Amino acid sequence: MWLMNKKQLLFVCILGIAVIRLDAAGSAVISDASTMPKNFVFEKIKYKISQHINFGKNITIQHDLDGDGMVETIVGLQAVADQEGVQEQFPRSFLIMGSDTGDRLALHYIIPGNDYFEKLELKDMDGDGLSEIVFWQTGGDHYTSLDIYKYHKGNIKRIFHDGSSCSVRIEGYNYPYKIKVGREKWDEQEWCHAQGTERYEAYIWNGKKFVYRERLSTSKLVGEEAAASRYAKEMSERVNEPKGFIVVGQ
């Protein structure tokens, strides 16, 4: 059930910020909007929440991630550099964790993502009965990045990362989930599809980590780094392709 007063509703509508708390039963209720930081510093650069890019996607979720009875505050947001003299004014997504002190959010972790924030999800990705943080971001060339973080007793650890211009998705309604990462096939014209068949690497949790499973995949294991390197090479070759003759002086 959604609960909010008029002041909170106005804040949510004006800033486009969803502030959600999950209680012990998994119900969603609106929490104090002060848990959304207005600005912060990362790697000596000051950032502020963007009021224009990805308007309405910023979100705060409060939930006990490690089952210790203490509620953690997880924030996913779109930020832009807000510092004079900083050359790169490009947008950047962030995952932020902290503690709600009542009037502000005490920041514990600030984790950068790709250019644009898309969404946060809480899913039990490893089957231990506790929720992991699923952090979705996008970048140029329709690139989708997926990061999954596990939080336990004050420590946060990334247990999965990958990305692709050919789509990334999680399949399943509960554990065990399957992660599908689309891959290009460079020797064919259809990069992400081959003869009408989607090409993807499939990953599942094996009890310790996410691993590639060939029998569940339609692509050999390529990996993000190799795919990105091949893409850069392909783009460079296209830039250097002859564009025809230019006749001067006629």
Image: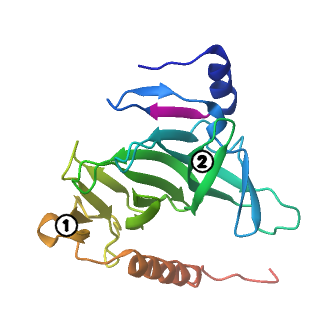
Q: Quadrant of residue 162?
A: bottom left
Span of residues in magenta:
17-21
Q: Amino acid at mark 2?
A: Leu
Reply above or below: 210 against 58.
below
Q: Amino acid at mark 1?
A: Thr
Residue ranking furthest to the left? 215
Can you say which quadrant of the picture contains the N terminus?
A: top left
Q: Secondary structure at mark 2?
A: strand
Q: Residue at x 62, y 20 (%)?
A: 9
Q: Which mark is residue 218?
A: 1
Q: Nearer the viewer, residue 246 or 76?
A: 76
The residue under label 2 is: 77
Reply above or below: 75 against 207.
above
Q: Quadrant of residue 34?
A: top right
* 223 sits left or right of 73 in the view: left
Q: Is residue 164 visible?
A: no
Which x, y percent locates residue 244?
60, 80
Q: Which mark is residue 240?
A: none
Q: Residue at x 57, y 46 (%)?
A: 99
